[in-house]
Image (cartoon, rainbow, N blue to C red):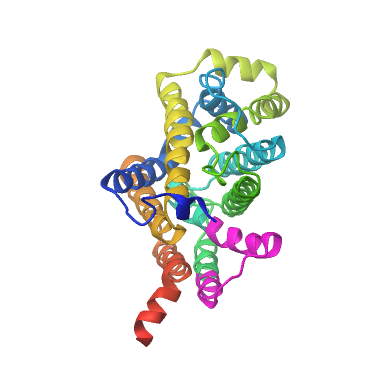
């Protein structure tokens, strides 16, 4: 039985739940612009190290280790930390625009679907595959509009962002496996399957710190890393605080708790707002202007997400 089914208010989306969902999509939508700002002063690997130091070290002394085996904590830290944001920071530095990154990252939903089917045996409906096909067409449209000029999306940036989305999907599967484990190993009859998302996130955020730092030194040398640390600007410090405290600790915790309290179909549609906010924020704050083909591809990707999440429901209503 799922955590949502056990919760007494699982069917009621309260005002606080709505505000939590909107806060998450706003934080994640602005997240890509903030990453661009942070990468102006430090390397991608060093930004990753600082992000996860901020997300874990202030809290790990006060928060108990999550009640799941270490393999899930390590797996999530490697996939979500090193994998997702290692690839994404590199992509943004190598020419991926912030607005298009917010769109392409949504492909994680479809990779998650395929991995859940292959690894967990979860059944996929026709709407899932129709949405996947539609989104694939949209991503191809976006990829075909790459360029090499100033402010244009590069092909290597696009491909690295797809890698980041795939790693995000892997972290989703690890989190799902942790939930399944807790469901089969409850602490007691009243707690059948839940785990503390804040503890899980804080402790898993310890994992990427040292690897990110080693990669930063290997990639740029200790002298450059030391110089970047000594010359941190206020803008970079604020970017790190935003990425570590808001985009990582707060947003992921709120989102996970929403998924624990409510069916996925009720929570997931809010994620459609992330690329919209990301595109608008990148246009207003960074001056990015997507091409018509990229905008058309974005619409097709979002249509694929709608089909994936609501296709079955819409079809049943049309038949009735």
Residue in the picture at 50% in, 71% down: 131
Locate residue 307, reporting x and y percent: 44, 71
Picture quadrant where residue 87 is located: top right
**Furthest residue to the bottom?**
319
- In this view, 119 is above or below 238: below
Whether 192 is among the magenta residues is no
Residue in the picture at 47% in, 48% down: 260
The dominant secondary structure in magenta is: helix
Whether 109 is among the magenta residues is yes
Residue 17 seen in the current view: yes
- In this view, 61 is above or below 13: above
Quarter of the picture containing the N terminus is bottom right
- The magenta stretch is 107-134
Quarter of the picture containing the C terminus is bottom left
Residue in the picture at 54% in, 12% down: 230
Count of numbered badges drawn on the protein: 0
Q: Is residue 166 left or right of residue 318?
A: right
**Furthest residue to the top?**
230
Locate residue 286, reporting x and y percent: 37, 41
Residue 297 seen in the current view: no
């Amino acid at each position: 039985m799922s955590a949502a089914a056990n919760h007494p208010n699982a069917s009621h989306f309260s005002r606080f739940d709505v505000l939590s969902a909107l806060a998450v999509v706003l934080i994640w939508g602005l997240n890509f612009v903030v990453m661009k700002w942070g990468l102006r002063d430090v390397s991608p690997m060093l930004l990753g190290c600082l992000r996860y130091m901020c997300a874990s070290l202030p809290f790990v002394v006060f928060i108990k280790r999550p009640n799941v085996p270490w393999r899930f904590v390590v797996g999530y830290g490697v996939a979500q930390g090193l994998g997702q944001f290692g690839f994404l920071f590199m992509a943004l530095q190598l020419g991926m625009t912030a607005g298009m990154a917010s769109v392409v990252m949504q492909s994680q939903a479809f990779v998650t679907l395929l991995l859940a089917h292959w690894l967990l045996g979860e059944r996929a409906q026709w709407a899932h595959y129709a949405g996947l096909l539609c989104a694939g067409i949209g991503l191809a449209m976006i990829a075909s509009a790459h360029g090499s000029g100033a402010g244009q999306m590069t092909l290597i940036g696009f491909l690295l962002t797809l890698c980041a989305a795939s790693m995000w999907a892997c972290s989703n599967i690890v989190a799902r496996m942790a939930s399944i484990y807790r469901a089969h190993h409850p602490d007691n009859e009243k707690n059948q399957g839940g785990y503390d998302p804040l503890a899980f996130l804080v402790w898993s955020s310890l994992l990427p710190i040292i690897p990110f730092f080693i990669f930063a030194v290997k990639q740029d040398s200790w002298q450059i890393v030391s110089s970047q640390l000594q010359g941190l600007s206020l803008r970079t410090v604020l970017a790190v605080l935003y990425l570590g405290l808001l985009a990582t600790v707060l947003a992921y915790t709120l989102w996970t708790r929403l998924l624990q309290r409510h069916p996925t179909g009720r929570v997931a549609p809010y994620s459609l707002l992330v690329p919209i906010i990301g595109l608008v924020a990148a246009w207003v704050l960074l001056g990015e202007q997507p091409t018509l083909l990229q905008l058309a591809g974005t619409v097709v990707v979002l249509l694929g997400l709608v089909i994936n999440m609501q296709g079955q429901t819409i079809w049943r209503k049309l038949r009735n």
